[in-house]
Image: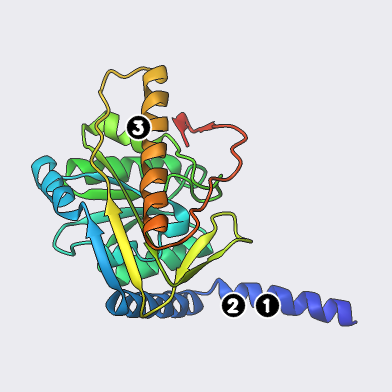
Amino acid sequence: MNFNLKKTLKKSLRRITKSDFVINLISSAIYWYARLVGKTTSWEVRGIDNFYREWDDNRGIILVAWHGRALMLPYFWNRKKPLNALVSLHRDGRMIAGLLEKFGLGTIGGSSNENASGAAVKLMHSLKDDTAICIIPDGPRGPRMHMGRSPLYYAQKTGKPIACISYSIANSFRITKSWDHMMIPLPFSRGICTVSETMSVPADADNNELETYRLRLEEQLNRISRECDIKMGLIPDEPGVCKNQTKENGQPR
């Protein structure tokens, strides 16, 4: 009897947490917390002016960031410049979509194994319409801080450049039990946000060349993340174990 009751309660709780009302409530709480952290943190921002000049010159750009450092990214975006972010269709992705929309940003639902082809078409159209896109290349399931090929795919097909963005906050902690080691910033602190120089991918690059660009992009994002942590006096996070790179739906992850 007790076992059945516990099982019923767990199922009920899962249904409740998947409801639109609860998801919107959680995304609202995260939004206001991110605003509080952003407003009360003394920020040093590097590379953002050059990034926006590149955006203006190319009328669109591909932005990449690690999953564990995604929470504060919407805070830095210039709302006058359109951006669509790729988000997962599951519950966590819906929460992130709600957060981004509250910051005035667009979202496209999908991932490497959820609505992949539909999301790819929408992302391509976004770039061709001079809208920036944001991709989390180690999401939605890792391995942590390893670059998938999807940003390179869109850069190669559209001719748009790629830029990396990362941040760190002195007063923060990481959820080390989660695969992404999500960084949770605390208010009233010091922080740094860095945007890298852009990278372009030739339209005629073959698979070997694409792998070279992938490794270069991965190192660039890891490097600026590491530099941000060191600047804030933190021990830099390390990439997770990468078993292999897989292809799904004809597109590299």
Of residue 18 and residue 252, the one placed in the foreground of this image is 252
**Residue 4: percent from left, percent from top:** 85, 77
Q: Is residue 224 left or right of residue 111?
A: left
Q: Is residue 137 left or right of residue 77?
A: right
Q: Is residue 101 left or right of residue 112?
A: left
Q: CA distance from mark 1 to mark 2?
A: 6 Å
Helix, strand or loop under label 1: helix
Tag 2 residue? 16
Mark positioned earlier in the residue sequence (3 or 2) = 2
Q: What type is the residue that disc 2 sits on? A: Ile
Q: What type is the residue that disc 3 sits on? A: Tyr
Q: Residues within 10 Å of mark 2 (few under 14, many from 20)?
A: few
Q: Residues within 10 Å of mark 1 (few under 14, many from 20)?
A: few
Q: Are marks 1 and 2 in contact (CB under 8 Å)?
A: yes
Q: CA distance from mark 3 to mark 2?
A: 38 Å
The N terminus is located in which quarter? bottom right
Q: Residues within 10 Å of mark 3 (few under 14, many from 20)?
A: some
> Residue drawn at (34%, 33%), measured in percent from left and top?
152
> Residue drawn at (18%, 64%), measured in percent from left and top?
79
> Which disc is residue 2 wearing?
none
Disc nearest the viewer among 3 and 2: 3
> Residue drawn at (42%, 58%), measured in percent from left and top?
69
Helix, strand or loop under label 3: helix
Q: Are marks 3 and 2 in contact (CB under 8 Å)?
A: no
**Residue 161: percent from left, percent from top:** 23, 37
Helix, strand or loop under label 2: helix
Tag 3 residue? 153
Tag 1 residue? 12
**Residue 86: percent from left, percent from top:** 37, 52
Q: What type is the residue that disc 1 sits on? A: Ser
